[in-house]
Image (spheres, grey):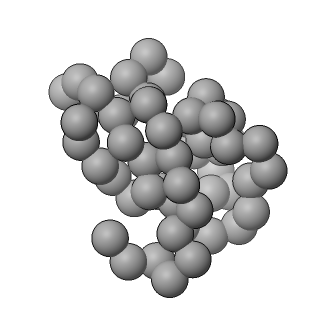
C-alpha cells in the first residue's frame, strides 16, 4: 500500500476523496492510501484529513 498527500479543492482530488469514503470534504491536505502503480479511482483505498499538512 502506498501513501500520497493531496490537497482538496480540485475536482479530481475531491472525486478521489469521495471514492475513499470521505463524507465531508474540508479545505486542506489529506493523506490518501492506494494500491497499484498510480493513484486513480480504481486503486484508492482510504483517506484521512491531515490538519498540519505533514506526512
Residue 4 falls left or right of residue 21: left
Place of residue 25 in the rendered image (x, y in percent of width and height, measured from the top left): 74, 53
* Residue 33, image quadrant: top left
Looking at the rendering, in which quadrant would you find the C terminus? Answer: bottom left
- Residue sitting at x 44%, y 16%: 42
Residue 7 falls left or right of residue 23: left
Place of residue 32 in the rendered image (x, y in percent of width and height, measured from the top left): 43, 47
Looking at the rendering, in which quadrant would you find the N terminus? Answer: top left
Q: Is residue 25 above or below residue 11?
A: below
* Residue 14, image quadrant: top right
Q: Is residue 14 above or below residue 7?
A: above
Residue 12 falls left or right of residue 4: right
Residue farthest toward the bottom in the current orientation of the protein? 52
Q: Look at the image and tell me whether residue 12 can be seen.
A: no
- Residue sitting at x 71%, y 67%: 27
Q: Is residue 26 above or below residue 24?
A: below
- Residue sitting at x 44%, y 31%: 45
- Residue sitting at x 29%, y 49%: 3
Residue farthest toward the right in the current orientation of the protein? 24
Q: Look at the image and tell me whether residue 32 can be seen.
A: yes
Place of residue 21 in the rendered image (x, y in percent of width and height, measured from the top left): 64, 35
For the image, the number of numbered tags is: 0
Place of residue 40 in the rendered image (x, y in percent of width and height, measured from the top left): 42, 27
Amino acid at each position: 500500500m502506498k501513501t500520497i498527500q493531496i490537497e482538496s479543492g480540485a475536482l479530481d482530488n475531491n472525486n478521489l476523496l469521495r471514492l475513499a469514503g470521505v463524507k465531508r470534504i474540508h479545505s486542506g491536505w489529506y493523506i490518501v492510501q492506494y494500491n497499484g502503480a498510480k493513484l486513480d479511482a480504481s486503486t484508492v483505498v482510504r483517506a484521512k484529513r491531515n490538519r498540519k499538512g505533514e506526512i
